[in-house]
């Protein structure tokens, strides 16, 4: 069975500032902010939520089906997916756009400042979710073009494919009514603690009320502290996994969500899926980039 991943594919330019943003940004001067950071470390990685999720899901032994958009410069990314043995029939290539680009600056505390050019993402809605679900067991709506997220959620609901709503950094694009419509169509929600607060403020809901609705679960990630699992109005804290090294947080959330998809696809209890996600996230943060970590499914308890 396959997991359909609707989201962005991007090239990440990642820079590391060997200091602390908090020491360089004066709170009383943010209205005239003009800051320059010297970044000795720079590299370019394959990224984007869909690409990162697919990488980890494939590494766990899952079957990702990517639904995304690339630009005219995306040939090497398309070849990369095919080298993993993935079906790329749902990847749209926009000849007049660049592939989405993320410029990510991290400091010593793993705080991040990101600039993002959507590029071909804005054409992602031109490829539809298959009307016949076939062997698609579960899906995820991850950050993507605004039209794509709206249309793909509706198409998944129409095809009766259960999906995770993962608005991520795309959450500010939607007002409360639009977010509630996503929630009504979804089967699960996955957000970090900041996104959870914004989602509740915009919709007028609480995590208690959301999880007491038709949703099977609301998952709120808490970084190193682990994750809160909300089911039927009740919250369970699931402890995090200590990482051997803190190297790069880029893509940790995507790795975690791949584990959720892997567990859901196999009918696992959500707690077990989250525990796998915490282990995978701890391994990912010890590696640079969103698609360079190595996983052993047997050692992770994924088989």
Image (tube, helix red, strand yellow):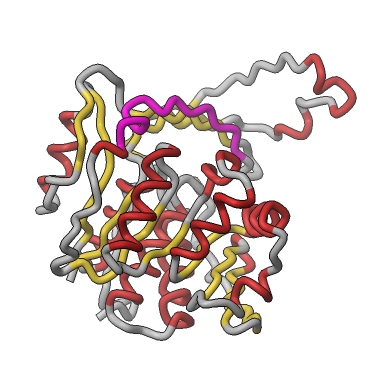
| Residue 57 x, y percent position in the rendering | 28, 62
Q: Is residue 264 above or below residue 286?
A: below
Residue 54 against residue 38 in the figure, above or below: below
Assess whether residue 158 is covered by the magenta stretch. no
Q: Residue at x 36, y 47 (%)?
A: 151
Q: What residue is rendered at 68% in x and 52% in y?
A: 202
Q: Quadrant of the C terminus?
A: bottom left
Which residue is at a point 41% across and 46% down the rendered structure image? 149
Locate residue 111: give its quadrant. top right
Closest to the observer: 298 or 215? 215
Number of numbered callouts drawn: 0
In front of the other: 121 or 27: 121
Residue situated in front as seen by the camera: 34 or 63: 63
Is residue 148 placed above or below 301 in the rendered structure? above
Image coordinates of residue 19 in percent, x first then y, are: 67, 32
The x, y position of residue 62, in whole percent, is 22, 67
Image point (24%, 52%), residue name: 129
- Assess whether residue 120 is covered by the magenta stretch: yes
Tell whether 121 sits left or right of 16.
left
In the picture as drawn, the residue positioned furthest to the right comes out as 28
Q: Residue 41, how many percent across, how many down? A: 48, 27
The N terminus, quarter of image: bottom left
Indicate whether 124 appears above or below 63. above
Segment tinted magenta in the rendering: 112-124
């Amino acid at each position: 069975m396959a997991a359909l991943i609707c989201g962005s594919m991007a090239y990440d330019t990642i820079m590391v500032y060997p200091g602390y943003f908090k020491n360089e940004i004066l709170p009383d001067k943010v209205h005239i902010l003009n800051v320059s950071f010297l970044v000795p470390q720079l590299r370019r990685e394959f990224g984007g939520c869909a690409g990162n999720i697919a990488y980890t899901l494939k590494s766990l032994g899952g079957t990702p089906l990517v639904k995304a958009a690339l630009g005219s410069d995306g040939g090497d990314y398309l070849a990369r997916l095919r080298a993993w043995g993935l079906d790329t029939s749902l990847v749209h290539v926009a000849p007049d756009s660049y592939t989405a680009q993320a410029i990510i600056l991290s400091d010593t505390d793993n705080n991040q400042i990101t600039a993002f050019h959507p590029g071909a993402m804005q054409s992602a809605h031109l490829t539809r979710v298959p009307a016949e679900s076939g062997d698609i067991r579960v899906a995820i709506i991850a950050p993507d073009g605004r039209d794509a997220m709206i249309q793909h959620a509706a198409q998944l609901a129409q095809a009766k494919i259960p999906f995770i709503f993962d608005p991520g950094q795309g959450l500010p694009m939607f007002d409360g009514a639009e977010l509630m419509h996503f929630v009504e169509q979804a089967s699960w929600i996955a957000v970090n603690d900041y996104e959870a607060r914004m989602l509740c403020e915009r919709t007028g809901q609480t995590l208690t009320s959301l999880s007491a609705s038709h949703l099977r679960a609301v998952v709120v990630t808490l970084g190193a502290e682990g994750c809160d699992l909300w089911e039927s109005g009740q919250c369970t804290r699931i402890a995090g996994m200590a990482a051997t090294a803190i190297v790069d947080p880029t893509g940790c959330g995507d790795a975690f969500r791949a584990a959720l998809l892997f567990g859901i696809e196999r009918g696992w209890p959500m707690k077990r899926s989250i525990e796998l996600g915490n282990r995978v996230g701890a391994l990912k943060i010890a590696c640079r980039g969103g698609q360079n970590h190595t996983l052993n499914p047997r050692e992770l308890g994924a088989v």
